[in-house]
């Protein structure tokens, strides 16, 4: 497939016959080290997966570090700018044909990885490739990098699932001695049943796009600058040096804070903090391994649009006219609400205070959506409960080590249930590495707290009943005999909702859940004559264990 035109812009896809180059060699190395047999033991499987991951890391680095001319990275940078132009049309409804969204997103991520790793290389000057042979050579190199890094991400996912689920993968070899990674037990059936249906859940989550202009306004206020001017001056400097076509013109990064300080009457140190928060260089770039295994770090091109390369011993900054405005959007929607912004910016107390304020609001965004659902459906509930009112007695405090504040208590008369709800406004996760972060947080942090809340409410139903009678001024309320069910309400899907000890209900499923029609309650997966119910990814018990 190689070079494509998508929506009028260039895109590189890799040829699948590259497996003959890398997959064959990797398989042989695995056989040489571990033997040619089937592996099911969790520790052995994980060791093999890690070995393959390290092999691919080595290959990717060899491919990138063999390029010592700025020409190659200029070409990859141009491809990335092209991808943003495609993306902007796609979000308006244009088709990505002949590729799909997964390949497009993965390709953009890999192009960023190539550009970031290039910061470590002492480059020689070069100009944008014009010769067709040079373009073909670069296209082939990009294809190899796309193939290798695609499988790097796949193996990172394999490892994450292996760590989350007992005996998740098995490793074996086909008739051509090529490595095969497959599911154990019923996990493949469960995966292919559950995961294709969660795409729409992302679209129906609770998000706050209005935060983008709010962040820009706060940047202007805290740094005493104008964010748009700070970007525009970059393009003006580029045009000054290259009036005909400034899109790939580099500049010396030290001039940016000088201009910003002069324009707005601030110190160069203050101006430098601003630009440093938007800069990726060999001083703060992540290793390739961390780039893949820690996808939510702020030290990445995703958030920092100013790439600094060492070219003939001099620092030169490469800044995309498409990437600069994209970065503030990503910072607002993917970072700010979770108490993360560039560490350089957090040296500014005004920005730090703003970030903490917005971070504290994110659960409220989801809670407000939940409250609207409950009001629309005339369900009785209490929200953000720290104490419970009592007839002719003092309020009972629950905001303590024995229980803890409860986001919602909901009386579901139809199902005869008292729901104890904790709302979790999580980052949207699209890969198993991110799912594992959520899974760890739920199991290590949230579940123990939920257990305390569940037990306290279970042992104090009469206290809860009094509270509802008082706040609704209705002595006929009686939840005696109701089942206590403790659940999470979440804004975006994650693996935990398929395999947690507690149910985790996405915003789009809350109404069905309250009505007794929650699809994962009703779902039963058939596998080898057995019925698998939630939680779906637990190792089957042996007959003697049942």
Image: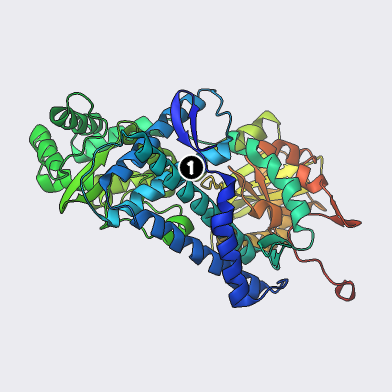
Left or right relative to 82: residue 182: right
Q: To which quarter of the image does residue 383 belong?
A: top right
Point out the image quarter for the N terminus.
top right
Query: Does the image show residue 432?
Result: no
Q: Secondary structure at mark 1?
A: helix
Residue 408 at x, y = what percent? 62, 46
Which residue lies at the image location 61% right of the left edge and 60% below the top edge?
158
Total marks in image: 1
> Quick one: 138 or 65, which is closer to the camera?
138
Which residue lies at the image location 28% right of the left edge and 57% below the top edge?
120
Point out the image quarter for the C terminus.
bottom right
Query: Does the image show residue 288?
Result: yes
Left or right relative to 292: residue 260: left
Residue 356 at x, y = what percent? 36, 48
Left or right relative to 173: residue 75: left
> Quick one: 125 or 303, which is closer to the camera?
125
> Quick one: 541 or 424, which is closer to the camera?
541
Residue 29 at x, y = what percent? 57, 70
Q: To which quarter of the image does residue 278 belong?
A: top left
Q: Is residue 34 above or below residue 79?
A: below
Which residue lies at the image location 23% right of the left edge and 35% below the top edge?
221
Where is mark 1, residue-wise? 107
Left or right relative to 22: residue 201: right
Mark 1 nearby-residue class (10 Å; few <14, some 14–19, many ≥20): many
């Amino acid at each position: 497939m190689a070079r494509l035109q998508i929506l009028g812009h260039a895109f590189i896809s890799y040829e699948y016959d590259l497996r003959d180059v890398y997959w064959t060699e990797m398989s042989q190395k695995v056989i040489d080290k571990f033997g040619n047999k089937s592996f099911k033991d969790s520790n052995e499987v994980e060791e093999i997966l890690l070995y393959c991951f390290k092999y691919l890391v080595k290959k990717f680095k060899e491919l990138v570090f063999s390029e010592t001319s700025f020409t190659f990275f200029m070409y990859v940078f141009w491809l990335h700018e092209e991808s943003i132009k495609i993306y902007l049309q796609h979000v308006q409804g244009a088709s990505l044909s002949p590729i799909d969204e997964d390949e497009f997103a993965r390709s953009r991520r890999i192009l960023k990885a190539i550009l970031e790793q290039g910061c470590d290389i002492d480059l020689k000057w070069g100009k944008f490739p014009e010769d067709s042979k040079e373009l073909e050579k670069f296209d082939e190199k990009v294809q190899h990098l796309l193939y290798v890094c695609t499988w790097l991400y796949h193996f990172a996912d394999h490892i994450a699932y292996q760590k989350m689920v007992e005996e998740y993968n098995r490793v074996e070899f086909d008739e051509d001695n090529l490595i095969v990674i497959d599911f154990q037990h019923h996990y493949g059936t469960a995966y292919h049943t559950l995961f294709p249906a969660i795409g729409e859940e992302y679209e129906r989550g609770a998000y706050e796009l209005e935060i983008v202009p709010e962040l820009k306004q706060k940047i202007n206020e805290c740094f005493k600058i104008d964010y748009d001017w700070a970007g525009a001056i970059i393009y003006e400097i580029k045009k000054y040096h290259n009036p005909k076509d400034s899109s790939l013109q580099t500049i010396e990064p030290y001039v940016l804070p000088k201009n910003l300080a002069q324009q707005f009457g601030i110190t160069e140190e203050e101006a430098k903090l601003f630009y440093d928060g938007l800069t990726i260089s060999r001083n703060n770039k992540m290793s390739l391994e961390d780039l893949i295994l820690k996808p939510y770090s702020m030290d990445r091109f995703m958030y920092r649009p100013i790439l600094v390369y060492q070219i003939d011993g001099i620092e030169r900054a490469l800044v995309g006219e498409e990437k600069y405005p994209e970065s503030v959007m990503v910072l607002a929607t993917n970072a700010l609400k979770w108490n993360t912004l560039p560490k350089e910016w957090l040296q500014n107390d005004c920005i730090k205070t703003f970030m903490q304020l917005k971070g504290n609001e994110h659960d409220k965004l989801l809670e407000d959506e939940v409250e609207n659902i409950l009001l629309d459906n005339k369900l009785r509930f209490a929200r953000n409960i720290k104490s419970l009112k009592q007839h002719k007695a003092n309020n009972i405090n629950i905001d303590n080590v024995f229980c803890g504040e409860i986001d919602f208590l909901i009386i579901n008369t139809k199902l005869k249930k008292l729901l104890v709800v904790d709302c979790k406004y999580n980052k949207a996760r699209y890969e198993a590495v991110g799912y594992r972060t959520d899974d760890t947080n739920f199991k290590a942090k949230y579940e123990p707290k939920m257990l305390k809340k569940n037990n306290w409410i279970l042992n104090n139903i009469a206290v809860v009943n009094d509270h509802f009678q008082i706040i609704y001024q209705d002595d006929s309320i009686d939840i005696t005999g109701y089942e206590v069910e403790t659940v999470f309400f979440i804004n975006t899907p994650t693996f935990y909702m398929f395999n947690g000890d507690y149910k985790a209900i996405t915003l789009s499923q809350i109404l069905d859940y309250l009505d007794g029609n929650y699809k994962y309650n009703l779902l039963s997966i058939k596998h080898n004559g057995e019925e698998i119910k939630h939680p779906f990814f637990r190792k089957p018990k042996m007959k003697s264990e049942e």
